[in-house]
Image (spheres, rainbow, N blue to C red):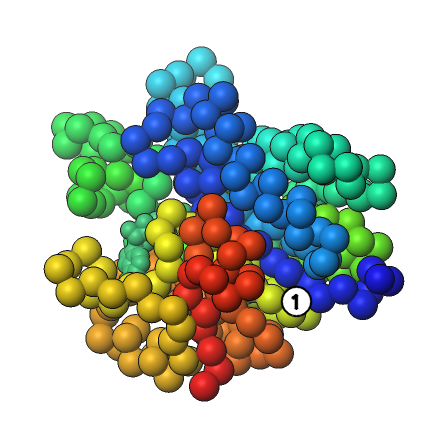
Amino acid sequence: MNSTEKPTLLVALGGNALVRKGQIGTIEEQFENLRVPISQVARLCREYRIIITHGNGPQVGNLLLQQECCDDVPKMPLEILVAQTQGQIGYMIESTLDSELMRQGIATAKPLVSLISYVVVDEGCPAFLNPAKPIGPVFPQERVHTLPYPVRNTEKGYRRVVASPEPLTIVEKNEIMRLIDLDFIVICCGGGGIPVVREGRSFSGVDAVIDKDLASARLAQEVGVDIFLIATDVQGVAIHYGTPDQVFLKSLTLADARSYLDKGQFPEGSMMPKVVACSRFLSGKGKRALITSIASIEAALSGQAGTEILCE
Ligand code: ADP
Ligand code: MG
């Protein structure tokens, strides 16, 4: 099959693709965990042109903690930390994928690349007036007044909060399109992308983090992806999640999604951005949107697992 005849698939990997709940996140654990989604992606590249995006919560959290523990070197702003995690996780995905392609006998024909990615946000986005996304370590209450940034008392304790603005556009979208047309597997938009604002013809980084599901949906729309798949640590979308009435849904329509969102079924920090991301993708030209577990990417594509969001 000519590469441009193959449908395009974007797989957005959640943080648990690298560090599972209960693990401390040693490098051995992270490489081992990655083999689960990446062996599936390696098989899928025969059938699809593929883009991989990924979260960075645990990794950026560790970098922030390292910064808090050491005053001997200058502290770096968030944009730099996000860039560091794109390099770190991009390398881990690339090398795991390379080994898997080799193991499956696909390697010689299959180029792959990970791309440092900028995502443009608007300085006027209301999120900047109300930093609400907790990141990094938990601080003892007595340290809170010494910290040079906004802090909130969250479920886990006192944590730094940053703005999570809307992703407007992916700066490298044209390069990504050209690469996938050449049948490169492209790893990009790590951690939701490096948040930048446009200043004339140049960009400058801002202290914020962009939700990786929303950034992935934006990329999927801009590149014209056919299938958008979010892989996380639950089997799909449930209603009454975490209660005795919990039911995982095999599918839900855009109208159902809207109504469950309005009823508060999907929390802001976890399932809400995934359902919103899928809804935005399908409201554009997207064909299929799926939310499934890291272990069931292939099964979800063949309708055997996960939750599919349907136009009607
Ligand atoms: P990721 O790193 O993949 O983005 P998140 O923690 O942000 O993971 O989102 C996945 C989590 O969403 C699950 O672990 C689950 O606890 C939570 N969740 C909240 N509401 C729901 C729901 N209605 N259905 C399924 N999972 C839900
Ligand atoms: Mg998340």
**Label 1 residue SS:** loop
Q: Which residue is mark 1?
A: 225
Image quadrant of ligand 1 equals bottom left
Residue 98 makes an appearance in the image: no
Residue at image coords 47%, 78%: 310
As drawn, is 32 to the left or to the right of 67?
right
**Viewport quadrant of the N terminus:** bottom right
Q: Nearer the viewer, residue 237 or 182?
A: 237
Does mark 1's beta carbon lie closer than 8 Å to ligand 1? no
At which x and y percent is residue 246?
A: 20, 62
* Residue 91 position by quadrant: top right
Residue 112 versus residue 164 in the image, above or below: above
* Residue 298 position by quadrant: bottom right
As drawn, is 23 to the left or to the right of 241?
right
As drawn, is 298 to the left or to the right of 42?
left
Residue at image coords 40%, 22%: 66
Residue 56 versus residue 23 in the image, above or below: below
